[in-house]
Image: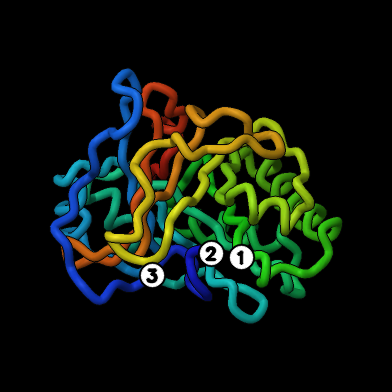
């Protein structure tokens, strides 16, 4: 399974829970940090509330993969709200792999859009999930992803990969990709009761992603709290490398 249809990381939940960042359930020597991800527009007050519950990073969707793909018009305001609400913020990019536009063109739209609003980031996350939405052409899919990575290099932007072992194998044929951080998903369904454990004990090496301590894990989707719909994630605190690469607001 994966994050849902057209708007990716958002899955709406019918109920509300009093949700706080979870406690480490694995080795006591490992300390985890907590993050949210979402795509729908969220208020500063909601971000403030979530920040007070222990989440420190926000990963915010910026692209709509419908038709040929387009930038989400309120993404910049959403990012600005999250920064004001106290989060380190990273954009994530769900491309349209069946677009008439190349992956490089789509990424260019995102970077230029953010620049228009004076939002600058050293890292963006690329979502490679939902094999059904990708062409049945693994070689072509690898070329599409490669085009995005090459374009990011020209923009001097690092790319993290959001996927898991199954999606990556189905979409790319287990293409080995080295030198990129991993964000993997592991959930049993939508909602608080369908979360996996808030640890990385279920990590399995694949392609060039070989070590769980360098990864971030999405363990819950379709959550609702602080008047916001969001998903939540953990990462190993002492190995987090992206703290200084979040979105910067420049005047």
- Neighbours of disc 1 within 10 Å: few (<14), some (14-19), many (20+): some
- Neighbours of disc 3 within 10 Å: few (<14), some (14-19), many (20+): many
The secondary structure type at the circle numbered 1 is loop
Residue nearest the viewer, comparing 231 with 90: 231
For label 1, the residue is 130
The secondary structure type at the circle numbered 3 is loop
The secondary structure type at the circle numbered 2 is loop
* Residue under the point 71% across and 68% down: 134
- Evaluate whether residue 251 shows in this view: no
For label 2, the residue is 1
Provide residue 60's location: percent of width, then percent of height. Answer: 41, 56
* Left or right: 251 in relation to 241: left
CB under 8 Å between discs 2 and 1: no
Provide residue 166's location: percent of width, then percent of height. Answer: 64, 53
Q: Which mark is residue 206?
A: none
* Left or right: 96 in relation to 88: right
Q: Earlier in the sequence, mark 2 or mark 1?
A: 2
Residue nearest the viewer, comparing 114 with 185: 185
* Left or right: 16 in relation to 249: left
For label 3, the residue is 11
Q: Earlier in the sequence, mark 2 or mark 3?
A: 2
In terms of image quadrants, where is residue 237? top left
Residue nearest the viewer, comparing 153 with 171: 171
In the rendered view, tell whether residue 222 sits above or below residue 85. below
* Residue under the point 23% across and 37% down: 23
- Neighbours of disc 2 within 10 Å: few (<14), some (14-19), many (20+): few
Measured Cα–Cα span from mark 2 to mark 1: 7 Å
């Amino acid at each position: 399974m994966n994050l849902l249809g057209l708007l990716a990381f958002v899955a709406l939940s019918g109920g509300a829970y009093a949700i706080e960042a979870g406690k480490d359930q694995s080795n006591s020597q490992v300390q985890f940090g907590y993050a949210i991800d979402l795509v729908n527009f969220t208020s500063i007050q909601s971000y403030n509330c979530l920040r007070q519950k222990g989440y420190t990073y926000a990963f915010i969707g910026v692209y709509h993969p419908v038709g040929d793909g387009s930038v989400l018009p309120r993404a910049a305001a959403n990012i600005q709200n999250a920064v004001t609400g106290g989060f380190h913020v990273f954009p994530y990019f769900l491309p349209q792999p069946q677009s008439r536009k190349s992956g490089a063109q789509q990424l260019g739209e995102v970077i230029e859009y953010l620049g228009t609003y004076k939002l600058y980031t050293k890292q963006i996350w690329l979502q490679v999930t939902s094999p059904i939405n990708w062409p049945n052409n693994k070689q072509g899919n690898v070329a599409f992803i490669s085009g995005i990575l090459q374009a990011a290099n020209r923009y001097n932007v690092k790319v993290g990969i959001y996927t898991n072992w199954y999606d990556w194998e189905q979409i790319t044929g287990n293409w080995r990709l080295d030198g990129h951080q991993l964000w993997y998903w592991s959930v049993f369904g939508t909602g608080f009761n369908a979360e996996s454990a808030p640890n990385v004990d279920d990590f399995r090496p694949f392609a060039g992603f070989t070590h769980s301590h360098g990864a971030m894990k999405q363990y819950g989707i379709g959550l609702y709290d602080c008047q916001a719909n969001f998903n939540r994630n953990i990462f190993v605190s002492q190995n987090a490398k992206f703290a200084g690469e979040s979105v910067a607001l420049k005047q």
